Image (cartoon, helix red, strand yellow):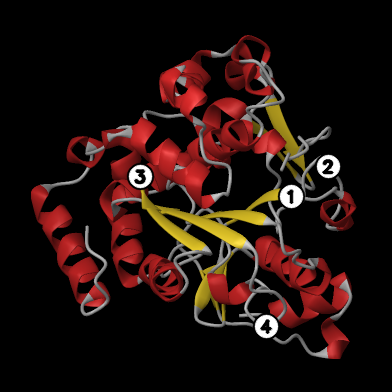
Amino acid sequence: MAFVPIDKEESLTEIPPEHASSKCHTNFISKLPTREGWSQPLVLYKDYWFRPQLLENILVAQDTYMPRSNDVILATQPKCGTTWLKALCFTIVNRSQYSFSNHPLLTRNPQHVVPFIEIRNEGGDHNYIESLPSPRLLSTHMPLSFIPIETKNQSCRIVYLCRDPKDAFVSRWYFENKLFNGCSLDLGKIFDMFCEGFSPYGPFWNHFLEYWKASMERPEKVMFLKYEDIKSDPALVVRKLADFLGMPFTKAEDDGGIPEQVVKLCDFETLASLQVNQTGLVRGKNYELHNSVFFRKGRVGDWVNHISEEMAGRLDRIVQEKLIGSGLTF
């Protein structure tokens, strides 16, 4: 099985027929509950908060994305290790095609080689996803219930990566301030909203739980990972990922240290130091981002430098309460 790299950048919810066009989606979204507080107002749809433009993209994706049995979908909440997961999985599944000394990730950002299902980028519109040859390596921030998999196709593999909410919050706060030039969000106010579940693609705990429960029900199809576990033993997780993706390392590869080379290539410091990730851009419809915004520190426990113990305790208690009885802990 070989995954073709992208040459260009960038619950199935029932949408009424009258919302089939982008214009109708826009009209539909304009009637949804709206709340301000983040860098842009968010709208509430199916118990999740979204930026209006992103929700429009999601609705279009739900209309156009047709799962294939051999699709692999990398799912995350924003700022939970998306770029790292893309790099690791892309390298694992394409390891027979590229040498580590002449690898696409040395000259291209991971966001460029694994396209989002719902975010339009330089690859084109949503129809671009459909034009890609199988097997496809795709990504999403959507909740599981928003992806047309459960009712149309149960053969797709999904890898979900979550992160300690305290670190995810800090990373999100930094990202929001970088995303919109001149934006300076008050950390305390944003923290309060995050604790309420009011954040892009939030509440985060519902997002976590959807994928967690699916991984318990169908572990052969849904793999649930924690950012902290990858940081603790990346080579072990790389081997587990390869097994899950149906591309286990051979004994010769293991003996030759290939899993460790995957880890080295995808190491945070390695990727962040590359020229493409310091000066390159990701362009899409109505946006342009510097590749550097996808790399901050990538450390576990950096929250201690930004929020108080009291704030951390508050968030921990909320997480414990929301996840109680699920078996998922942080």
Q: Which residue is mark 1?
A: 136
Q: Which numbered tag is attached to residue 38?
A: none
Q: Which residue is mark 2?
A: 123
Tell me which amino acid carries mark 1: Arg
Q: Which residue is mark 3?
A: 227
Callout 1 environment at 10 Å: few (<14), some (14 to 19), or many (20+)?
many
Q: CA distance from mark 4 to mark 3?
A: 29 Å
Q: Which residue is mark 4?
A: 151
197 displayed left or right of 244: left
Instruction: Name the quadrant of the N terminus.
Output: top right
Question: Secondary structure beneath disc 3?
Answer: helix
Q: CA distance from mark 4 to mark 2?
A: 27 Å
Tell me which amino acid carries mark 4: Thr
Marks 1 and 3: in contact by CB < 8 Å? no
Residue 183, can we see it?
Answer: no
In the orientation shown, which residue stands out farthest toward the top?
101
